Amino acid sequence: MKILVVGRGGREHSIIMKVAESERVSAIYAAPGNGGIAEQATCIPIDELDIDGLLAFAKEEAIDLTIIGPENPLNAGIANKFNEAGLAIFAPTKEAALLEGSKQFAKQFMQAYDIPTAAYQSFTSVEQAKAYIAEKGAPIVIKADGLAAGKGVIVAETKEQAFTAVEEMLVEKTFDEAGSTIVIEEFLQGEEFSLMAFVHENQVYPMVPARDHKRAYDQDHGPNTGGMGAFSPVPDLTQADIDFSYTHILQKTVDGLIEEGRAFTGILYAGLMNTEDGPKVIEFNTRFGDPETQVVLPLLKNDLVQVVLDVLAGRNPELQWHNKACVGVVLASEGYPGAYQKGVELPTLHTERAFIAHAGTKQADGVFVSDGGRVLLAGSTAASIEEAARNAYTAFASVKKDGGFFYRTDIAKIEMKQA
């Protein structure tokens, strides 16, 4: 089979590494890919949002299966176009992807189908938003309605911080049109976790749970990022928590989408908070999470291509998982998630005990240089979270503090004590 993976990040590199294990695969293409992906796949210089270009390439190369990584092409309707052309694609339609594309839609949907989530209100008016915050108090959560590359969420510890977030989104347009409507939610107490599932219409096949670290700096300080590291499984979750999330969140969601005429095919990701009242939805994504994919897929025993083919055909893929743990630590450009420099040569990485998933990299004059905020992830699979974390961090032994890159030193540390 010829496989096309659309995207350029660490998630896509992880998907490609897993696809490359399949005996069914004869060729892998990535559009547009990155420096690390180029070592395992043929990178095609077509942007993720050039849907016509991707469609023409898939037809010309007789691609057997296309897998979409990032959210933007989903909301632009890439699955609709491929489906209309009779090409196999593992991705939701733009109608189903609205679950991620609009937080306001997602909240209304959850309310309609009795899916547990935080109380909320939506606003386009600065004055009304501030009045709501003044009434509810802090901490409180401010979200841009649209897609903001994982950065459109502000957890405000004080009312003043919340007012500033409202001004930034609605007046200063920090997130452009994604923030022209904002959603203000109650702050949920508890531990976060992510639960992804392979989905086709009403059939849901959950993966092992993961937890990512969203704040930029150690001890969960600093601004929200797209994720600074992750691990799987999650030791403090009970089977009852996972079963509840499957039955009352994932299954209810796909059943509700069918009822709305938005039947879902692809990866459904639930970002959840395990509160004292049980798991509640923080957000939905309609694709593989990043960096959760980098620590979940290495634990999958199955051939990923066969899993996707089975799911698309309505067959149970009978997922099997290694009884191990996986930890991944992100190396980021200094300044991320704010302004940062590109083109910095990557430090020497030690890969005796770790694997590397490239994200924002490219090759220049025979060396890897940075080409994004999150540069790469060093990960390891081992018998315990503690061992996996130790192994992952060995990759960064030569990374100097003033070398243009940084990483968190506490990924999975809390879980290591519990494991």
Image: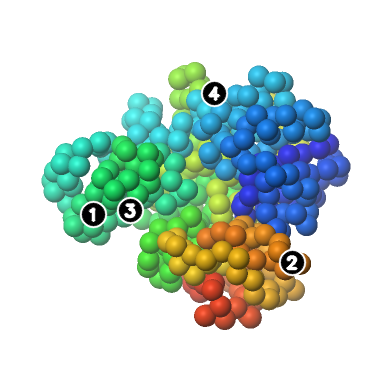
Q: 194 or 183: which is nearer to us? A: 183
Left or right of residue 5, residue 258 in this image = left
- Label drawn at residue 154: 3
Q: Residue at x 26, y 45 (%)?
A: 171
Q: How far apart are marks 1 and 3 (CA)?
A: 10 Å
Of callouts 3 and 4, the N-terminal one = 3
In front: label 4 or label 1? 1
Q: Residue at x 78, y 54 (%)?
A: 40
Q: Looking at numbered disc 4 in the image, what kind of residue is underneath it?
A: Ala
Of callouts 2 and 3, the N-terminal one = 3
Q: 258 or 349: which is nearer to us? A: 349
- Local packing at callout 2 (Cα closer than 10 Å; few below 14, some 14-19, many 20+) is few
Mark 1 — residue? 164
Mark 4 — residue? 263
- Local packing at callout 1 (Cα closer than 10 Å; few below 14, some 14-19, many 20+) is few
In front: label 2 or label 4? 2
Q: Distance between the residues labelled 3 and 4?
A: 31 Å
Q: Looking at numbered disc 1 in the image, what kind of residue is underneath it?
A: Thr
Q: Are marks 3 and 4 in contact (CB under 8 Å)?
A: no
In front: label 3 or label 4? 3
- Label drawn at residue 365: 2
Query: Could you tell me if residue 275 is visible in this image?
Result: no
